Amino acid sequence: MYIDEKITLSADLPKGLRSDFKELQEYYDAGDWLRFDLLFETVEASVKAYYLAGKISREELNLIFRKYGIA
């Protein structure tokens, strides 16, 4: 469970991603490792799908991955 609080994501990200990130933040703040990890698996796949569909840029993908410790 990791979130780099220094990295700020664009407010222009798709609504679904922003909602997922908000939920991840809630679990992170609560120290709920299980729910964070379960949701994180889905969010990681979703981020990749948004990138492949051209809905987020490569730069946004990399920033998201750095924020959530994927890369």
Image (tube, helix red, strand yellow):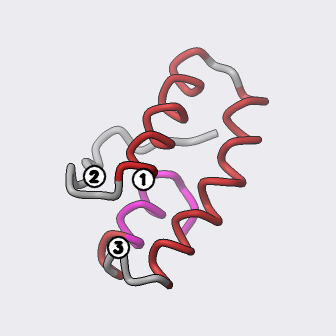
Labels 3 & 2 near each other (Cβ < 8 A): no
Q: Residue at x 28, y 43 (%)?
A: 6
Residue sitting at x 32%, y 69%: 60
- Compute the Cα span from label 3 to label 2: 12 Å
- What residue lies at 43% left-to-right and 34% top-to-bottom? 22
Q: Is residue 22 above or below residue 10?
A: above
What's the mark number on residue 56? 3
| Residue at image mark 2 | 9
Q: Residue at x 21, y 49 (%)?
A: 11
Q: Give the quarter of the image for residue 70.
A: bottom right
Answer whether labels 2 and 1 touch (C-beta < 8 Å).
Answer: yes
Q: Indicate the secondary structure of the residue bearing disc 2.
A: loop
* Residue 63 magenta-highlighted: yes
Three-letter amino acid code of the residue under disc 2 = Leu
- Labels 2 and 1: the sequence-earlier one: 2
Helix, strand or loop under label 3: loop
Image depth: mark 1 or mark 3 in front? 3
User: Observer-nearest residue: 60 or 53?
Assistant: 53
- Disc on res. 67: 1
